[in-house]
Structures are given as C-alpha cells and as structure tokens.
Image (tube, grey):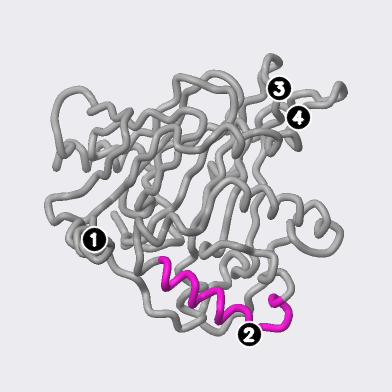
Amino acid sequence: MLGSRPSGTNEMLELQLERKWGPVQQGPPLEISRPCIIMDEHRKILAWCLPFILSERHQVCVHLKFKKTPNDSAEEPSRSTSWRTDRRYFREWSQLELNSGVVNLSPGWHHQGHEGLDDPIYISASLRDKNKQAGDEWLHDIQAILSGMMMVVMHPDLHVAGRECMRQLAQNEELKNTLQRWASIFNGAQIISNWVTPAHHDLKSRMQWYDLLASIGSYHNASLELHGANISIKDGPGTVISLCGTAVRHSLMKYEGDRLCYAYFMRDSVHASMHVEAAGWCKTDHMEALLMLQGL
C-alpha cells in the first residue's frame, strides 16, 4: 500500500514503482554542477541549485562545536526504528575532525504523535531549560549561514506564509521570547554533522514547500541524488539547495571529509494550528512575473 505520504524508505516498494513507471529520464543520471532550477512538465519548480554560493566568511568557525576532543571515541552503531536516529548513518571514522551528530532546533512545534490542530506547541528541548545558553549559540550559527530573504525570490508565497506563521506563534507568551531570537521564516532547523542520508521523502511538510539545505566543511565528492528524476546535484562546501523534499525522493550517501549541513524546514501541522493559508507550488510564470516587477 503506497499511502498518502510514502516515506520513500521502503526499497522493495520503490523498486516496484520504478519498474512500473520508470525514471523521468533514462540512462545515467543527469549531473548538475552549475546554478539552475529543476521543474516538471507543468512548470512547477521542484528545486533550486546554487553551488558554492556561500562565501568563506559565512563558513568559518561555525563548525567548531562539533570538533572532537582527545577523549572522544566512536560508539558502535545501534539499530533504530527510524533512520533519522540510527547511528549506522553517522560517520565515526578516526580521520574525521568533527563529531557526528544532529541538533534539532525549533521555536515552536508539536511533540511526536501529538500534531492535531488543538495539540500544544512547544519550544524544542535544545532551546530551553539547561540547554538555553548552548541553544542561543546554535541560533547565532543558523542565522549566520543563511539569510531568510532567499525565499522571497525562490518562493514568495511560502515566504509570506512562513512570516505569518511566526507572527501567529508569537501570540503565545511561552514562545514569544524564543521567537524574538529566531530570525527565520522556517519553523524548524537541523544542524547535521558527518551524517549520510538514505533515500526518503520528508513527511511532515507539504509537497509544494521547500526545504533549504546549506552545506559547509572540508568535504568533497558529494552529490544529492534526486530519485525518480534521475538527477545528481553536485554538493560542495558553500552549496545551497532548495528542494521540495516531500515530493522528491532524495539521498546523499557518499562523500569524503567533514561535512556540516544546515537544513531548514516547515512543519505543516504548525501552519495548520496557526490557521495559516498553505502556500501552493512555485511555478516559472511566478518567477517571470517577479522579474517583470523588478524591471529585469
């Protein structure tokens, strides 16, 4: 059974779907290493690719919190019900300078399994109580990496929806203080260090919405694979990729060296709870209209 929101992690099911429908284009993957947009036959923009756009000034220092200490030792990988917490996907090699791990940040989201319209919204544990001071440092990092204004160009309607969601969340007195320090239209972020990502769909967003991925580090030979589209996007230090991660099955399983990925996302359940009108697809005609308004 495919379901309304397939995870993309069931390899047997994905193989059956590929045999039935096949990839969009046959042959070896189309390799992309230059700035571009990827759209479907209906002119919906599925991804923006901006290789090496972040300057070195944006990349220095922010990775130091993951630096190994002399007493660090790799743990044995443990099996988990979710690949997102499975240590088999963490790279724990002795020659790496950075620790492997994930930091989750949100000024307001639902607890797992309690994502109804009337369920309470909480600040992520990484930004409150004993973690507040360290969490503030992470907030500084994610704001230093990316400007929130990128989405004004990439998906104007999503930018408006994100801003409105933040405004509505700020009406909650328990979240207000954290939101004053949260300079993003996205209501969630992950800082991912030395972690490979198996093929999957992002389940808690919407088909039409972008995740924003910014990568830094001293790594090389990395590519983000877009399965079904049969596209391979070159991902080097300083690259930013905006992707409809719910619609497009994607993975990044191989690279050499140390890599930090800053992943920004929106939770559909939070927007629904705040009664924010959902943004639709961004199409190329929207971009043409925007350029005309700017006189370009």
Residue 222 or 160: which is nearer the viewer? 160
Could you tell whether 287 is left or right of 134 in the image?
left
Locate residue 227, reporting x and y percent: 29, 37
Contact (Cβ within 8 Å) of mark 4 with mark 3: yes
Q: Residue type at mark 1: give it.
A: Gly
Q: Mark 3 or mark 4, which is nearer the start of the sequence?
A: 4
Toward which corner of the image does residue 89 lie, by quadrant?
top right
70 versus 216 height, above or below: above
Q: Which mark is residue 97?
A: 3
Q: Is residue 81 visible?
A: no
Calculate the distance from the C-alpha at mark 4 to the C-alpha at mark 3. Answer: 6 Å
Q: Which residue carries the number 1 mark?
A: 295
Contact (Cβ within 8 Å) of mark 2 with mark 3: no
Q: Which mark is residue 171?
A: 2
Toward which corner of the image does residue 278 lie, by quadrant?
bottom left
Could you tell whether 114 is left or right of 157 in the image?
right
Locate residue 195, reporting x and y percent: 57, 33
Q: Residue type at mark 4: give it.
A: Lys
* Residue drawn at x 47%, y 59% as measured from the top left: 149
Range shown magenta: 159-176
